């Protein structure tokens, strides 16, 4: 059924439109996927990629347009029907039960039975065989909770394959993976393709697109704007199609020059023998020491979950340090509250803007004063006029769109939401900026602008601690690179010595 | 786009605020019709009787205003909690404690103390009585993570039992469940200003309570503390990252919530009977939840919703001749269910409960 003649698409979506309330998620999308190919669906955040794929996976019907599978009209089918027709989707957020084993997760909902009980022996055998067949190395009795993110993702893929998926949709699968894990994923996908499987890959990372895919479809603002074979396409041309204009890619940017102020010896941020207790592991941060000078960006590379979050939270005052010292200039801030640290010029771009960065139901203006609200008190009342005036200025400076301070932050795109967070952090003079995942889930155009702002802050003399799971971001911005693994800083090196090749092994603890 | 989109956005916001209560009202009217038909009466006649007995004459309207006064207080209490992301189910105990606080001060003051002094003192005592009862679950939540739904329900029993014990010890007039009449701090009935209200319990505490609603609205939406309270309610982690102490904000919110419930005590004690009586708060706490939900946790919405539920409650008495009063209780239940199904805040609250587990 997969090879229904050359050229005949296995998936054909035509003229798809989908609206959620006032938001037009998809205006006009057309997608054709050939059997046995890896098809990259690329576009900025909010372009409608995930929505289009959820329609294909039967999670909701389109408002208009048709969905065909091997020439059969399946428009508006259900998720159960999609699974039966061997279309499976691996979501960005895993849908696994942490306390169950790999086997139990994989068979969930289709358990083999013996009498009333689950036939666990048979289940384990079957899941182990399926893992073997697809080239996964895993202990099917391991508890999902104890797996790394990459391993959990493989469980999620295995679960989809065991349910018979021959058309596999992956939504931003590499967002949480280290470079070696990404390579492992590519190996799995290529193996799947070799056995005749079809893969649709949602991503906004251009290097991935050029590395793995056969065909590219580009979405922009709810429309599919281009479709071309990967062979012959450059990252530059894909980016142009995504954004609709020429983009300065971070990797092309000039290597960060040592800034003129970097001679200033006075440390902006000095962390000494910091230990932070973790939730399950004894020490989330284990005896970490480093210093960031004024006018310098120290990038911390590492796979997520190696203590970066605890490190950030301890530095900004959200989590208590078990031992060690945090110095801001020559002042010990280890015991101070978030508010006190902020007042001393320590700014923070939280890693998760929806959880820590923004109050989504507050207006843009209200979000811009979060943390500074007491400064707007005027005789016991919030000075609305000043809040709005400052918001308009910040919106102007940070190019937040739409430029309406009264709009709820929820209504803005991810990139514009992140601009609010960054505008707030840089709203006044800061001596130290802790920037965690500053461009996560942000579109290419906004990344460019955010990176420029961080460089400008650095050049103005701010000490910046950049923590990013995106290695290319660390390499594009940092003057020095430190690698965090297992709660420790395992290596620190100047930017000139850092590369994917040197950092990759360090990030996985292999070196 | 924003220039043209703004009026549409405003319209959407207004529609979003008003639609759920209106839909709920429509559903309850239909349900009410069915209930009335089920007991063999004509809906038209019953509704006419209900209106006549409430808004149709000065006495009935006065009674509605009296009941409104208490419900505004418990409704504000629940609303302030909800704004901070907390579900205060203890308004009944807080209301009773506020009533006893007002009565104790009214009893302690020498007879003939000027109202200019006595009324504020008694009012502060009512706020303090409720505030203390609200402070306890606030601290329990902030310091030890004890969920306020559990602690406020449990505190209801404890506080009501405690008040009953205090009353039975030395305070009550023998053979009754109430204290002596207060010596000072009485508030005038509205009838002293407008004669047709004669006989109804409506009194000047209504004005104090309306002022409290205005003050609550000002606090929530026009002060930095209110901003922090709402930020904590919507996104506690973001508030924490912004340097707001989530725990202290919870304590502040539940104390304020309890104080507002306690304020309702002056309606009965200073304005109506002039003594504290066991059981005067019964039901007002739970009805306050309905008032806050229908009023969308907005102080002015709370005032309107309190008026609505007070009308239903008084109307239930008025139609007693045609249908059983329990029918109105059933109708209140329908209104609350319809609201719960249609109001986004409630859905979010339930979702939070699920994910917090």
Image (cartoon, rainbow, N blue to C red):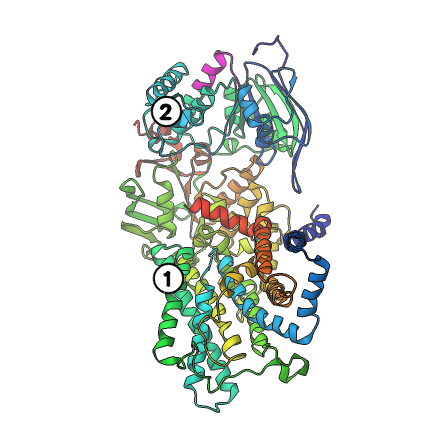
Q: Nearer the viewer, residue B257 or A249?
A: B257
Q: Is residue A349 above or below residue B99?
A: above
Measuring from the top left, give residue A450's x and y in whole percent.
53, 42
Q: Which residue appears at 37% of the width and 37% of the height?
A: A305
Mark 2 secondary-structure assignment: strand
Q: Nearer the viewer, residue A24 or B333?
A: B333
Mark 2, residues whose alpha carbon is within 10 Å: few (<14), some, or many (≥20)?
Answer: some
Mark 1, residues whose alpha carbon is within 10 Å: few (<14), some, or many (≥20)?
Answer: many
Is A41 contained in the magenta span? no
Question: How many numbered markers are drawn?
Answer: 2
Q: Nearer the viewer, residue B4 or B157?
A: B157
Extent of the magenta region: A188-198
Measuring from the top left, give residue B254's x and y in whole percent.
44, 63
Q: Could you tell me which chain the residue with mark 2 belongs to? A: A
Numbered circle sitting on residue A118: 2
Q: Is residue A470 above or below residue A216?
A: below
Numbered circle sitting on residue B183: none
Mark 1 secondary-structure assignment: helix
């Amino acid at each position: 059924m997969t090879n229904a003649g050359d050229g005949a698409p296995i998936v054909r979506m035509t003229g798809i439109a989908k609206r959620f309330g006032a938001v037009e998620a998809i205006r006009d999308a057309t997608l054709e996927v050939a059997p046995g190919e890896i098809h990259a669906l690329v576009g900025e955040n909010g372009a409608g990629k995930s929505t289009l794929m959820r329609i294909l996976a039967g999670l909701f019907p389109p408002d208009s347009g048709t969905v065909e599978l091997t020439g059969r009209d399946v428009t508006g089918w259900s998720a159960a029907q999609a699974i039966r027709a061997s279309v499976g989707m691996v979501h960005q957020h895993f849908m696994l039960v942490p306390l169950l084993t790999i086997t139990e997760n994989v068979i969930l909902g289709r358990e083999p039975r013996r009498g009333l009980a689950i036939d666990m022996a048979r289940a384990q055998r079957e899941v182990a065989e399926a893992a073997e067949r697809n080239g996964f190395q895993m202990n099917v009795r391991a508890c999902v909770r104890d797996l790394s993110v990459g391993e959990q993702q493989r469980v999620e893929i295995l679960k989809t394959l065991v349910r018979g998926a021959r058309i596999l949709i992956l939504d931003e699968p590499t967002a949480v993976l280290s470079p070696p894990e990404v390579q492992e994923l590519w190996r799995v996908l290529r193996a799947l393709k070799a056995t005749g499987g079809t893969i649709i890959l949602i991503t906004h990372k251009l290097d991935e697109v050029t590395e793995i895919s056969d065909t590219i479809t580009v979405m922009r603002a709810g429309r599919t704007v281009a479709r071309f074979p990967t062979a012959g396409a450059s990252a530059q041309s894909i980016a142009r199609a995504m954004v609709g204009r020429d983009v300065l890619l971070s990797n092309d940017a000039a290597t960060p020059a040592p800034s003129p102020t970097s001679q200033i010896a006075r440390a902006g941020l000095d962390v000494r023998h910091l230990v932070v207790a973790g939730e399950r592991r004894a020490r989330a941060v284990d005896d970490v020491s480093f210093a960031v000078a004024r006018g310098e960006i120290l990038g911390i590379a590492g796979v997520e979950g190696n203590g970066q979050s605890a490190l950030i939270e301890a530095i900004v005052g959200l989590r208590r340090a078990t031992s060690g010292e945090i110095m801001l200039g020559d002042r010990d801030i280890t015991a101070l509250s978030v508010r006190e640290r902020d007042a001393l010029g320590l700014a923070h771009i939280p890693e998760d803007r929806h959880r820590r960065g923004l109050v989504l139901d507050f207006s843009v203006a209200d979000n811009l004063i979060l943390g500074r609200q007491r400064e707007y008190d005027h005789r016991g009342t919030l000075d609305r006029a000043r809040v709005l005036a400052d918001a308009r200025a910040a919106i102007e400076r940070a190019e937040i769109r739409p430029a309406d301070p009264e709009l709820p932050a929820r209504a803005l795109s991810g990139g514009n939401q992140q601009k609010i967070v960054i505008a707030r952090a840089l709203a006044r003079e800061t001596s130290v900026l802790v920037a965690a995942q500053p461009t996560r889930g942000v579109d290419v155009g906004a990344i460019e602008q955010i990176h420029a702002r961080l460089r400008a802050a650095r050049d103005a003399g701010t000490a910046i601690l950049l923590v990013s799971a995106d290695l290319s971001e660390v390499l594009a911005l940092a003057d020095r690179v430190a690698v965090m693994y297992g709660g420790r800083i395992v290596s620190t090196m100047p930017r000139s010595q850092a590369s994917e090749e040197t950092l990759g092994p360090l990030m996985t603890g292999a070196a | 786009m924003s220039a043209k989109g703004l009026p549409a956005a405003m319209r959407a916001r207004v529609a979003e605020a008003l639609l759920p209560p209106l839909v709920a009202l429509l559903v309850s009217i239909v349900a009410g019709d069915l209930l009335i038909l089920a007991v063999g009466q004509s809906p038209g006649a019953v509704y006419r009787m209900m209106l006549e007995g409430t808004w149709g004459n000065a006495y009935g309207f006065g009674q509605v205003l009296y009941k409104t006064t208490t419900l505004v207080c418990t409704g504000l209490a629940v609303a302030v909690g909800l704004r901070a992301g907390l579900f205060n189910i203890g308004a009944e105990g807080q209301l009773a404690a506020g009533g006893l606080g007002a009565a104790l001060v009214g009893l302690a003051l020498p007879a003939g103390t000027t109202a200019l002094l006595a009324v504020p003192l008694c009012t502060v005592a009512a706020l303090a009585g409720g505030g203390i009862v609200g402070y306890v679950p606030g601290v329990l939540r902030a310091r030890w993570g004890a969920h306020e739904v559990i602690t406020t329900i449990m505190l209801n029993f404890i506080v009501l039992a405690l008040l009953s014990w205090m009353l039975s010890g030395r305070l009550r007039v023998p053979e009754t469940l109430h204290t002596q009449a207060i010596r000072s701090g009485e508030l005038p009935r509205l009838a002293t200003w407008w004669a047709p209200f004669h006989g109804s319990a409506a009194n000047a505490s209504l004005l104090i309570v309306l002022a409290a609603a205005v003050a609550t609205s000002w606090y929530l939406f026009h002060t930095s503390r209110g901003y922090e309270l709402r930020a904590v309610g919507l996104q506690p982690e973001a508030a924490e990252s912004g340097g707001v102490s989530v725990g202290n904000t919870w304590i502040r919110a539940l104390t304020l919530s309890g104080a507002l419930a306690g304020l309702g005590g002056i309606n009965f004690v200073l304005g109506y009977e002039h003594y504290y009586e066991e059981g005067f708060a019964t039901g007002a706490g739970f009805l306050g939840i309905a008032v806050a939900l229908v009023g969308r946790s907005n102080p002015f919405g709370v005032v309107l919703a309190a008026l609505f539920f007070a009308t239903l409650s008084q109307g239930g008495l008025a139609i007693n001749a045609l249908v059983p009063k329990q029918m109105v209780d059933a109708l209140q239940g329908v209104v609350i269910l319809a609201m719960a199904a249609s109001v986004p805040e409630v859905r979010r609250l339930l979702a939070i409960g699920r994910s917090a587990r």
